[in-house]
Amino acid sequence: MDKIKRLAFGTDHTAVNLRNAIKEYLQTINCEVEDFGFSGYGDCDYPEYAVKVAEVVVDKKVDKGILICGTGIGMSIAANKVKGAIAAVCWNEATAKLVALHNCANILCLGSRTATTNEICSRIRIFLETPFDERHLKRIEKIKEIEELRPQ
Ligand code: RB5
């Protein structure tokens, strides 16, 4: 990637052994990583990390967010509670591309228990390299309208 991408990175205890390798890889593809993840011992609660990453993404302090828990699912559910977050789980390279191209995702969620470190790195790279296709904008606007139905 030519242009530096600023990333917010958040992980729970399931990714403690992968997180440094992933961050090192991200630096090799021209990313500046702000790390909000858990690096201690024992267990933690993934919503705490999801909300930190989602807030800096929505506030445009970074370009994109990356969240990793056991499956990516809990992180995505929690991050999507933050207005403006579009946090999407991907499960292969094709869906890593499509969540950027069709869904305008600003946060990619991945599973430490469902993918290898190499697969995670490759999916992140594809996500970051893929621009949004404006053809899908009206659908994203309809999602944003749902956010306005109930005051937060
Ligand atoms: C933690 O054991 C696990 O539930 C969490 O990492 C995640 O997979 C939740 O969706």
Image: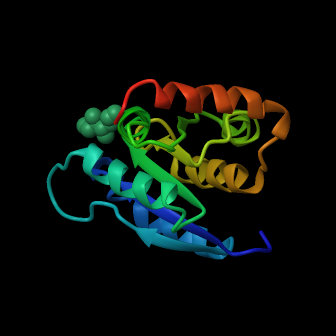
Any part of residue 18 in sight:
no
Provide residue 22's location: percent of width, then percent of height.
Answer: 51, 63
Q: Is residue 75 left or right of residue 139?
A: left
Q: Which image quadrant: the C terminus?
A: top left
User: Measuring 41% from the left and 62% from the top, which residue is drawn there?
Assistant: 19
Residue 135: quadrant of the picture? top right
Any part of residue 28 in sight:
yes
Q: Which image quadrant: the N terminus?
A: bottom right
Give ligand 1's quarter of the image.
top left
State the residue lying farthest toward the left: 42
Q: How is the image coloured?
A: rainbow
Provide residue 107's location: percent of width, then percent of height.
Answer: 54, 48
In the displayed structure, 107 sits above or below 99; it is below
Provide residue 97's location: percent of width, then percent of height.
Answer: 73, 41
User: Measuring 26% from the left and 50% from the top, which residue is drawn there?
Assistant: 48
Residue 125: quadrant of the picture? bottom right
User: Measuring 42% from the left and 44% from the top, which residue is drawn there?
Assistant: 112
In the displayed structure, 36 sits above or below 76; it is below
Q: Nearer the viewer, residue 74 or 19?
A: 74
Provide residue 38's location: percent of width, then percent of height.
Answer: 27, 60
| Total count of labels | 0
